[in-house]
Image: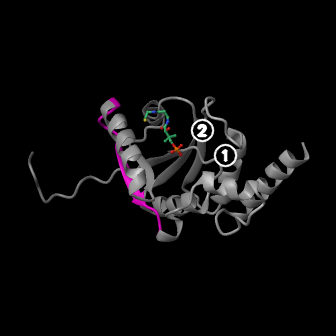
Amino acid sequence: MEITNKPAERRYTIAVYPGSFDPVTNGHLDIIHRAAHVFDKLIVAVLNNTSKNPLFSVEERMELLRHATADLPNVEIDSFRDLLINYMKQKDAHLIVRGLRAVSDFEYELQMASTNRKLCEDIETFFMTSSPQFSYLSSSIVKEIARFQGPVGDLVPPVVEQALHEKYGEERSE
Ligand code: PNS
């Protein structure tokens, strides 16, 4: 491979941050804010996976994400139900963003990144390490706390806190 000092031609960068986001947490928002500074456009893509049993519908998850990212003009919220790489091709995007919280995330993330690379070698995965205060945070932990009426105000944006209260309030009164 020839190595030159010529700067690479600057391309408009479209990155996709895929995930379940059931619901979006402050850990996700940390990655979204930082990635939105790095890439020209960031598409946050919610997996529409019928085999999982999510707390929030895809539409609800997208609506919460829209509220929580309303201050970020280069962030778009979308959903997909295909292989991620097919969705990426459709969006003309070549970069996947994923957050890494701890070593325990690494094996699964490496497997996903390698699979996506095998399926399409033009696609690169970029890992962003989560800020230390979010290294333990996950949507599952948030749901567990909220289910038992615990405080989640420091873990999720206010719109999600409200939505969790409503969900688990509804469940209790059923
Ligand atoms: O937030 P999650 O649940 O860890 O996100 C996982 C996600 C949505 C990124 C992953 O399951 C995915 O990309 N699913 C789409 C199907 C696919 O392309 N699978 C091949 C790569 S393993």
Identify which residue is drawn at 42% across, 41% down: 93
- Does residue 55 lie above or below 149 as drawn? above
Residue 116 is labelled as none
Residue 18 image point, x, y percent: 51, 44
Q: Which residue is drawn at 42% across and 51% down?
A: 105
Q: Which of 77 and 108 is in front in this view?
A: 108
Q: How crowded is mark 2: few (under 14 residues within 10 Å), some or many (20 or more)?
A: many
For image coordinates 64% across by 65% down, the residue present is 155
The magenta segment: 119-131
Q: Label 1's element?
A: helix
Magenta span includes 141: no
The residue that appears at 65% across and 52% down in the rendered structure is 65
Indicate the position of residue 20 as horizontal and vertical percent values.
58, 43
Q: Would residue 35 appear left or right of 119 to someone viewing this image?
A: right
Give the quadrant of the N terminus: top left
Q: Residue 71 is drawn in which quadrant?
A: bottom right
Q: Is residue 52 visible?
A: yes
Q: Which residue is identified by label 2?
A: 79
On whether residue 122 falls in the magenta region, the answer is: yes
Residue ranking furthest to the left: 2
Q: Earlier in the sequence, mark 1 or mark 2?
A: 1
Along the viewing direction, whichever of 162 and 106 lies nearer the viewer: 106
Q: Is residue 141 left or right of residue 92?
A: right
Residue occupied by mark 1? 62
Give residue 48's position: percent from left, percent from top. 61, 34
